[in-house]
Image (cartoon, rainbow, N blue to C red):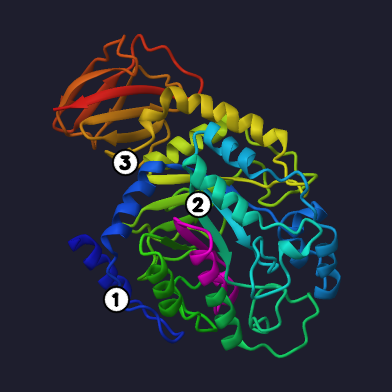
Amino acid sequence: MKLFRLLFTGYALLSIATGSLAQTYTPTAANLAAREEFQNDKFGMFIHWGASSVLGHGEWVMNNRNIHVKEYQRLINIFNPQNFDAAKWVATAKAAGMKYITFITRHHDGFSNWDTKQSDWKITKTPYEKDALKQLADECHKQGIKLYCYYSLLDWYRSDYQYETGKTGKGTGRKQKSDWESYIRFMKAQLTELLTNYGEISGIWFDGHWDQLDNDVDKTLKSKVNWHYDEIYELIHRLQPQCLISNNHHLLPIPGEDFQAFEKDLPGHNTTGFGGQSVSQLPLETCETMNDSWGFNITDRNYKTSKNLIQYMVKASCYNANFLLNVGPMPDGTIQQEFTDTLALMGKWLQQYGATVYGTRGAITTPKNWGGFTQKDKTVYMHILQKQESDYIFIPELKQKIKKASTLDGKTVIKFKQQPEGTFIYLNGIIWDNIDTILELQLQ
């Protein structure tokens, strides 16, 4: 608890130019337990889906094609996911070894995938008429999968959202003056629905804060609007104290947030251009796509291999982060076979090697070119992701005394030498695995 108090005190000293933010936050015992479970779960499914999938060009299609609201709202008469089967979605996640699902309840186009009473721009007004979130929530609870709700802070559809100062959604034809207080009330009402009508919700995953940043290189939460995070975060934690909050603002977390998200990057990395933020002491999660798209994109054939994704998941674990892997179901409600085939292969790998990932923490040192470490109690798993030309790996950070070293199956004893400057792990006689050669080190 002392660590959390120090952490949040530091966050409270951030220079914020946008009105009130929660200046103090003491997580409940239920919340701290949920954080621990979250870190143990390690692997989740992200689901980007909604009316936008009809156009087959990703979830940003409204913005990217400058589709006006009056034109875009025609999708409500077309979107009809008659093949949506929540049981299949959840079973697919379970077979892949995933422990939770983060579902798009409302993306930037404002379309709600549940029977909200706050708007008619929702799935129950389509020919499908049913509440997709209700079906998914019921099935998650039935099959023992945790449910997180993605919720967009920005909106390209509503006129009360302050689109005048936003960076995106400029071409959607809105002319009515915005009403920010109305928009905040709308979000609070929708979040209240999500947290009262669908059973236990394990987390709220916010996105879109970056739409209102003063500039693209600002590394604080300095914004053009007051997001009322103190009120919103308090509302969530009051309705469901265990519910975790994350905000994909690409910045250091603020008080009230329970885990830190990294988009298409490992913690501390910046291959995308919007990463590179400091890594907090909160639980961590990195999200990634299976091709290059989040939402259904009919021409995106750039599928990542199961090997690539397994190694990405392992690296995330070595960075002490969860791996949230996305699928973009088709408009009829089915998850395309390219995704399900790869997920099945990942599930088979985890059936055999999941003990080296689930319930572990990143250990010893940050990952290197050859791989990295995960740890559970006194057992350290050394994940070698690339075959080495040398007959040893030197780890200067490994100073703890090793009692025994072997291959994961225990059949081959691994020689090692520990000196004041570090530890040598010798690789003679190892049978290399194409994906991940795992050694087990037992510490004294």
Q: Nearer the viewer, residue 308 or 58?
A: 58
Report which quarter residue 13 is drawn in.
bottom left
Image quarter hosting the C terminus? top left
The range drawn in magenta is: 190-216
Report which quarter residue 42 is drawn in.
top left
Q: Secondary structure at mark 3?
A: strand
Mark 3 Cα within 10 Å, few/some/many (few <14, many 20+)? many
Give how far across and how far down residue 99 sits, in percent: 46, 41
Q: Taking the image as drawn, is residue 45 in sight?
A: no
Give how far across and how far down residue 249 sits, in percent: 50, 66
Q: Which residue is mark 2?
A: 147
Image point (71%, 46%), residue name: 84
Q: Nearer the viewer, mark 1 or mark 3?
A: 1
Residue type at numbered disc 1: Thr
The answer to whether 290 is drawn above or below residue 3 in the figure is above
Q: Which residue is mark 3?
A: 361
Decide which of tag 1 and tag 2 comes sooner along the chain.
1
